[in-house]
Image (cartoon, helix red, strand yellow):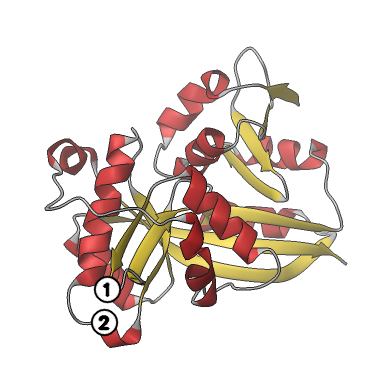
Amino acid sequence: MHKVKNLVAIENLLREDPFANLNVIGRMASNRNVDIYVDNLENPQGFILKDEEFLAPYSRNEEVIKGLLDHIQKDDMIDFCGIPVKMASLVENYLTDYEMNWEEDCHLYYLPEDKVKEFIADETLPSLKEEDVDIVNQHYTYKGEGSREYLLECILNRPSSVIRNDGGEPVSWALVREDYSMGVMYTLKECRKKGLAEKITQDLIYKVIQKGYTPYVHIIWGNTASMGLAEKSGMINWGHIRWFGLKRK
């Protein structure tokens, strides 16, 4: 296994299934300190990305994935970030010294290239500010230790969209995560059913396109409201992905 410094070494692999690897491309864009390892420097058939505690392997060859898993450093707890469910099952079955610690299945929705080229936002909304982080964290699904710092990093470093009330307080918002997926969408209960979430989505899609990336979102399995919103915005369902963590037995 060999460490490489940028996406150039794995460009051909990314082209094999660019939408399955949107999170890899996004993590490389957000954090230049992520590590990528390939099975072969001359003609790589697979890779594994390591971004702090998260891993994301890719190859069309199962034996290559197994080899990468054999050689990557593994702690007592290891987490995998939004990989196709078939690959997730391979990882779970192969790492027999580990058992499931947590998992979250999602739909991967993305905006296809023809829609990207013609996409126009109806209006341009402002972005979240540093001082908005507490209200965003207050309503964050995964609020906990470190979540405020995580959300602040997202707000300061990547696109976001917000609608405010007459007093200037945020009432609806969304932002771009560290893997360049759109997320953390929330609208205050008293402001729902007014089309705000649709406006936020349209605006954030436009901002992601302007940055040169493919807009995409991970939607928790079975969240029909978010699926409907994504489809109304022109996104299509790529398929089933899984976030999960394993712990040593």
Does residue 106 appear anywhere in the picture?
A: yes
Asked whether the beta carbons under mark 1 and mark 2 sit within 8 Å of each other, the answer is: yes
Q: Is residue 79 above or below residue 167?
A: above
Q: Is residue 133 above or below residue 188?
A: above
Q: Is residue 140 above or below residue 201?
A: below
Residue 5 place in picture, x, y as percent: 65, 21
Does residue 111 appear anywhere in the picture?
A: no
Residue drawn at x 36%, y 71% is 169
Mark 1 or 2: the one toward you: 1
Structural crowding at the residue carrying mark 1, measured as other residues with C-alpha within 10 Å and reported as few (<14), some (14–19) or many (≥20): few
Q: Secondary structure at mark 1?
A: loop
Q: Is residue 95 left or right of residue 164?
A: right
Quadrant holding the C terminus: bottom right
Structural crowding at the residue carrying mark 2, measured as other residues with C-alpha within 10 Å and reported as few (<14), some (14–19) or many (≥20): few
Q: Is residue 188 left or right of residue 194?
A: right
Q: Amino acid at mark 2?
A: Cys
Q: Amino acid at mark 1?
A: Asn
Residue drawn at x 68%, y 71% is 102
Q: For residue 165, which numbered disc appears in the image? A: 1
